[in-house]
Structures are given as structure tokens and as C-alpha cells.
């Protein structure tokens, strides 16, 4: 049989088509490889993929594996930066989430954390143009505008001396709403009624602090003030305080106890903090009383103290103070000063607020996510001698082992050993590890597991302040830290 001869181009068309496809795929893969490896496109796509992994909650198992690797130190790749719009992110302070909560007792302004699977696994970026912060003590008076590019407070409060924009800086004249001429003359006025010098008072709490100029000015008097304010319309106020090198904390007095032990502060101050002290049967005044050391001083400036159209609120505030046997030291304009009694309150007395003493089952120093109690803390409920005037003056109290150290077994001996240990360790940090402790380069320090505060005590002569954190699941030793004249908070990592 004869054969039909076809042109070469018409032979095996199916075979040639398949080879073309395979060849195209091969060269396409080679081209994609070069694009990913040798061009910025690859870096961008990889970063986007990693970012999606870090932020995604669609695969909890993948997320949990990544978290485990990070916590164990086995994740050797860099953690990516969060999106640029997260520069002002504050953990557990999401205004969108909180706005859906109840306004009752300011619940929506308190700390509310997302579920673990909703937390971002990325690094918060600095703002564009961020610079190494102005060093202490110059930072008390000015900071870089680019580090905190928020003009709202300067625009609204500049006439009250809070802060002003000046060239590349924000400057802080030291004023406040109730002391627009500066904190210094205001503190001088308070000094006529309160022993602000000489070491009698050491720890202070400034409630609703703004940019913390009052607390910053007290440092020169040897008083260590912890200033707090909520994240509100002036969302950056605590960030400004920290950038200045002033001890500060984002916090709200709402439905829970503040995260401090009983009898922590020698002096509590409110300058137009607008806390409704007598609301809810004086629950907020009772919480302030829990925190104030016996013999300590309470100062309230602004509403409702002799304030127009607030006669009833002012009368109620005085009634609560009388029910708790607070001594009225002075009413100077719109400022009132009380002194807490040294011993137990004069309760149980008949009073219009129905105030009663707490029972023995109440631990007044248990304050991490602990609901406010409408009962008054008795002095005898906390072991030891705490009144101002009896506790040693500063700086002697720093090295004296307080009786509250007995919250742990052999606490007094442990206190002394811990003090010696941290003296050695800090010397090693400075001399061998060459950490810049003791230099103006380091100002804000956090001790994440403070125990008795030995680390902070060893740094007391350096130009730093230490936020001593006592984990809430460990022995409640934060009272010891305050008895030493240091400051800190409870937290649960």
C-alpha cells in the first residue's frame, strides 16, 4: 500500500501543542523566580503575605503555631510592622470596640481586651519622621513634634498653658486648667497646707492628669507622682507625658478598682478630673479612700468645690468626707484639702450614703479586674503600720523592710536579700553589659516582674523612673513597693 506524504508542519499537531505549553510554563516559572528573587516586587509580595498571616484570624491553628514559635524564641524571621494607621494603637483601648459598651459608670472607657485570636501579631510602627527623644531633663519642657504629631491638645488647651507648638517642638509651660499660670505657683500654694518638702510625702496619684505637668513639677520636691487619664478625645495625653519622661498610665476610674494596693499613696490629687466622687453612694470616694494612706492628703481642685450651680454636689462631697472622719485642712478658692484619719474610720456611723466597713473576707489589695466595692477599707485589714508620719520618711523608707513584706514566707529576709542581689546586678548591667542606665539616654524603665522593687531601688540615684509591674497571679507584693516610696501597677501578662 502506498504512503501519503504530508508536509512537516502538519505532522503530530497534538504533540507540538503540548510541548509548546510545557515550554511556556517552564520559562514562565523561571521568569517568576527571577522577579521574586531579584526585584522589589518579590519583597513586596512576601511582606504582604507575611502581614496577612500576622493579622489574619481565618486560620487559628496557623496563628497559634506562630504565637508558640515566637514565645519559644524559635521564630527566627523578623516580625513585620503593623499598618501605618496603627501608629496610635493602645492594647485593649479600641474606641470602636468600646463605643458599643455601656456608658454606665464609664464602663466603655475602661480597659477591654479583644479575644486572643483578634490581637495583631505585628510591631507598632513609629510615626513618620520619628527622632531619638529629647533627653531628660530637657524633655520635661519640650519634645519633638514629629514624635507626637497631634495638635489637638495644643490647639484647645494652649491658652491654659498645657502645651504649644513652637518650631519643630511642642513646649510645655507647665500649666493646667486649674493652674494656667503654671504648676509651680499652684504647688507653692498647696505647700502652705501640706508638707510637700522634707520627705514626709513621697508617693502621689494625680487623677485626670492631662499632660502630667503637675506630676512632673512634683519631682523636684522629691515626690514621685503616678499620673493617669483615660483614652478619650485627647487620646495622646498620656503619650505626651511619657514622651516627656513623666510617670504616667492610661487608666479610667469606672466599674473596677484601680490596679494599685490599699494605702499606696501618701497624697492624691484631682485637678478638674471631673470624677463624680459622690455618685453611686460615694463609690468613687470610697475607692480613693482605699488607695490613700492613713494620715495622707486628698486635694480636689475645680468642680464641684465652691463651683457655680453645683451647690448640692459640693455639699454632698463634704458630707462624704465628714462621714469618713476626714479632717478639713483648707478651702482655698476652688481647692479643698482634706487629711485622712490615722486610724480606722469613724464608721459605723449613721450617714446618708449608707457607708459600711468591709468584712474580713475582702482583701483591699486585690485590685486586678476586681469590681468596685461599696464598703470602706479599715486600717486593720492590712498588716503593718502605714500612716503618714509613722512610716519612715524618704529616703529612709527605701531600704527599710516594711511589715507588708510578710505577704510571702520569710519576707523580711527575702527583702534584704533581694535588695543586695539587685545592687550587684545593676552594677553588672552598667559595668559589664554597658547598658546606659544612669545616663540621660534612658529615662522610662519598666520592670515586668518587680517582686519587692529591688531593681528600681538600685536605680534610685539615676535619672530614671521605673514602672514596677507585679503580675496579678503572683504574690501581691506591690504594697511593699509603695511602702518603699516607689510606684507600680498590677498587670497580667
Image (spheres, rainbow, N blue to C red):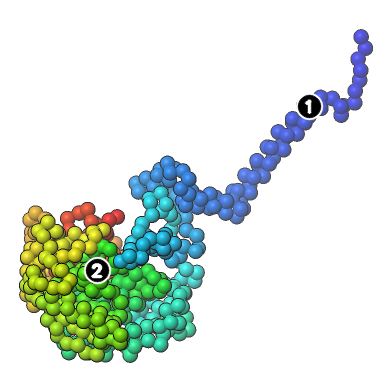
**Of residues 229 and 26, the one drawn nearer to the viewer in this rendering:** 229
Residues at marks 1 and 2 touching, judged by CB atoms closer than 8 Å? no
Q: x%, y% of residue 160?
A: 37, 86
In the visual, does 69 lie left or right of 247? right
Vertical comparison of 190 with 263: above or below: below
In the visual, does 369 lie left or right of 325? right
Circle 1 residue: 14
Residue drawn where x is 28% and y is 63% of the image: 255
Image quadrant in which you'd find residue 269: bottom left
Circle 2 residue: 280
Residue drawn where x is 23% and y is 74% of the image: 278
Vertical comparison of 81 with 173: above or below: above
Look at the numbered disc 1 and give the secondary structure of its residue: helix
Please identify the residue farthest to the top as the structure is shown. 1
**Of residues 226 and 232, the one drawn nearer to the viewer in this rendering:** 232
Vertical comparison of 283 with 393: above or below: above
Residue drawn where x is 43% and y is 54% of the image: 120
- Quadrant location, the N terminus: top right
* Camera-nearest label, 1 or 2: 2
Q: Going from the N terminus, do you reach mark 1 or mark 2 first?
A: 1
Question: Crowding at label 1, few (<14), some or many (≥20) Cα neighbours within 10 Å?
Answer: few
Question: Crowding at label 2, few (<14), some or many (≥20) Cα neighbours within 10 Å?
Answer: few
Image quadrant in which you'd find residue 202: bottom left
For residue 141, say whether it is visible: yes
In the visual, does 462 lie left or right of 145? left
Look at the numbered disc 2 and give the secondary structure of its residue: helix
For residue 449, say whether it is visible: no
Q: x%, y% of residue 226?
A: 26, 72
Amino acid at each position: 500500500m502506498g504512503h501519503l506524504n504530508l508536509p512537516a508542519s502538519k505532522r503530530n499537531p497534538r504533540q507540538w501543542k503540548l510541548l509548546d505549553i510545557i515550554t511556556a510554563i517552564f520559562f514562565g516559572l523561571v521568569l517568576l523566580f527571577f522577579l521574586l528573587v531579584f526585584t522589589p516586587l518579590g519583597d513586596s509580595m512576601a511582606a504582604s503575605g507575611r502581614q496577612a498571616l500576622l493579622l489574619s484570624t481565618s486560620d487559628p491553628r496557623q496563628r497559634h503555631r506562630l504565637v508558640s514559635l515566637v514565645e519559644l524564641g524559635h521564630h527566627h524571621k523578623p516580625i513585620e510592622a503593623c499598618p501605618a494607621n496603627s501608629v496610635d494603637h493602645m492594647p485593649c483601648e479600641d474606641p470602636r470596640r468600646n463605643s458599643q459598651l455601656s456608658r454606665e459608670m464609664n464602663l466603655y472607657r475602661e480597659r477591654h481586651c479583644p479575644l486572643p485570636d483578634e490581637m495583631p501579631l505585628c510591631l507598632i510602627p513609629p510615626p513618620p519622621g520619628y527622632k531619638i527623644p529629647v533627653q531628660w531633663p530637657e524633655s520635661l519642657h519640650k519634645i519633638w513634634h514629629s514624635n507626637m504629631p497631634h495638635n489637638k491638645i495644643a490647639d484647645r488647651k494652649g491658652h491654659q498653658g498645657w502645651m504649644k507648638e513652637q518650631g519643630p517642638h511642642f513646649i510645655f509651660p507647665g500649666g493646667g486648667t486649674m493652674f494656667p499660670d503654671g504648676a509651680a505657683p499652684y504647688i507653692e500654694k498647696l505647700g502652705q497646707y501640706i508638707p510637700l518638702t522634707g520627705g514626709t510625702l513621697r508617693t502621689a496619684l494625680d487623677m485626670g492628669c492631662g499632660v502630667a505637668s503637675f506630676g512632673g513639677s512634683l519631682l523636684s520636691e522629691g515626690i514621685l507622682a503616678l499620673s493617669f487619664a483615660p483614652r478619650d478625645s485627647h487620646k495622646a495625653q498620656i503619650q505626651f507625658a511619657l514622651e516627656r519622661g513623666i510617670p504616667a498610665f492610661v487608666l479610667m476610674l469606672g466599674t473596677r478598682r484601680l490596679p494599685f494596693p490599699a494605702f499606696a499613696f501618701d497624697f492624691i490629687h484631682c485637678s478638674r478630673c471631673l470624677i463624680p466622687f459622690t455618685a453611686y453612694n460615694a463609690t468613687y470616694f470610697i475607692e480613693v479612700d482605699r488607695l490613700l494612706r492613713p494620715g495622707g492628703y486628698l486635694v480636689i481642685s475645680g468642680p464641684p468645690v465652691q463651683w457655680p450651680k453645683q451647690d448640692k454636689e459640693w455639699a454632698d462631697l463634704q458630707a462624704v468626707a465628714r462621714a469618713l472622719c476626714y479632717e478639713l485642712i483648707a478651702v482655698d478658692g476652688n481647692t479643698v484639702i482634706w487629711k485622712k484619719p490615722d486610724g480606722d474610720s469613724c464608721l459605723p456611723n449613721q450617714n446618708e450614703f449608707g457607708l459600711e466597713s468591709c468584712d474580713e473576707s475582702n482583701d483591699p489589695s486585690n485590685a486586678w479586674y476586681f469590681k468596685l466595692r461599696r464598703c470602706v477599707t479599715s486600717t486593720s485589714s492590712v498588716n503593718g503600720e502605714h500612716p503618714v508620719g509613722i512610716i519612715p520618711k524618704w529616703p529612709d523608707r527605701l531600704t527599710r523592710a516594711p511589715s507588708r513584706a510578710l505577704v510571702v514566707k520569710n519576707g523580711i529576709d527575702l527583702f534584704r536579700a533581694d535588695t543586695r542581689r539587685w545592687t550587684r546586678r545593676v552594677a553588672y548591667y552598667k559595668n559589664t553589659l554597658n547598658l546606659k542606665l544612669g545616663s540621660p539616654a534612658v529615662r522610662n524603665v519598666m520592670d515586668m516582674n518587680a517582686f519587692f522593687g529591688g531593681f528600681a531601688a538600685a536605680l534610685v540615684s539615676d535619672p530614671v523612673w521605673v514602672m514596677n509591674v507585679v503580675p496579678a497571679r503572683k504574690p501581691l507584693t506591690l504594697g511593699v513597693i509603695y511602702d518603699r516610696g516607689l510606684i507600680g501597677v498590677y498587670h497580667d501578662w
